[in-house]
Amino acid sequence: MEQQAAKKRILSGIQPTGTFTLGNYIGAVRNWSRMQEEYECLYMVANLHALTVRQDPAALRRQTRESAALLLACGIDPAKSILFVQSQVPAHCELSWVLSCCTQFGELSRMTQFKDKSAKHPENVNAGLFTYPCLMAADILIYNADLVPVGADQNQHLELARNVAQRFNNNYSPTFTLPEGYNPKTGARVRSLQEPAKKMSKSDTNANAYILLTDDADTVLRKFKRAVTDSEGAVRAAEDKPGVTNLMGIYSALTGKGLDAIEAEFAGQGYGVFKEAVAGVVIDALRPIQAEYARVLADKEYLDRVLAEGAAAAGRIAGRTLAKVYRKVGMLQ
């Protein structure tokens, strides 16, 4: 009998800094449930990374649980994947220290996100903000992940993880898998409903710019009705029609229809009808997610058990890697 090839391992993480947006769902989280069939998946709520910005402790605890519940509601199956909270696997921090000693100051100082976040929070330019790429590298390398889904803003961090892994492997002996970036086959880049030149973000100061996965039907409809379009009145995708093109992308992602088919469907009907139709498919997509989210959050025992089992499973993998690293760098076992 032929031996089945081992599945490649993927690590994905999301910070618990508020409810996911429709952009998070279409661009990333929706694909995570699909990846479970093809890959060995670890999904992490990255609560340690959230500490680079001052957090309200009670809110952070609540949002960590809510993020885990929302991942379950979006289709993450704990029978197929490992879902865990980063802080509940201490080996991440232990490996981060070793890797920080293999990372050059100059490498960290070139990180564009450090520069951006320092500018946004000049009152709190802390050491963690500077060194968190080492923790991110530890998150990936401690599981010897083959693939890591990354957006354009994370490519630099993945490259650093590869460089540090290669340096450690050269200095000691082959230890870490060099991770590759993973770009899912599907998943549109959803833009702001108010400023379609920008991506949809929950940190936007205008609440009408984004759709949260927990928004009720009336809120979703109201936000889409207020979405920025243009004066032409024709539903067609074009570079000079970013607002309409963004709405068409959302409609396409949730219905599977191509842009030409959408243009034909709404020919001569104007933006009012089109916006209501986009809102309708979003509401239909969110309804089962919201129902499952409410069920999971209400069942505290179930959620705690899933996270405890996930942390134990992740900890077993991480512990083996850490023991190997400690032995190679000369720590007493």
Image (cartoon, rainbow, N blue to C red):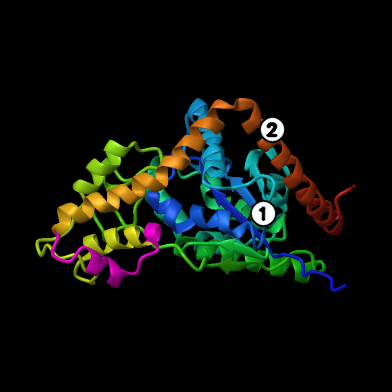
Which span of residues is magenta-colored? Answer: 253-269
Q: Amino acid at mark 1?
A: Ala
Q: CA distance from mark 1 to mark 2?
A: 25 Å
Determine crowd level at label 1: few under 14, some 14-19, many 20+ residues with C-alpha closer than 10 A. Answer: many
Q: Which mark is residue 305?
A: 2
Q: Residue at x 46, y 45 (%)?
A: 125
Disc 1, SS = helix
Task: Please tell me whether residue 305 is drawn above or below residue 199 in the rendered image.
Answer: above
Q: Earlier in the sequence, mark 1 or mark 2?
A: 1
Q: Amino acid at mark 2?
A: Arg
Q: Are marks 1 and 2 in contact (CB under 8 Å)?
A: no
| In this rendering, position of residue 250 left or right of residue 108 | left
Which residue is more in the foreground, 123 or 164?
Answer: 164
Which of pointers 1 and 2 indicates the residue nearer the eye? 2
Task: Please tell me whether residue 93 is drawn above or below residue 57 in the rendered image.
Answer: below
Q: Residue furthest right?
A: 333
Camera sees residue 144: yes
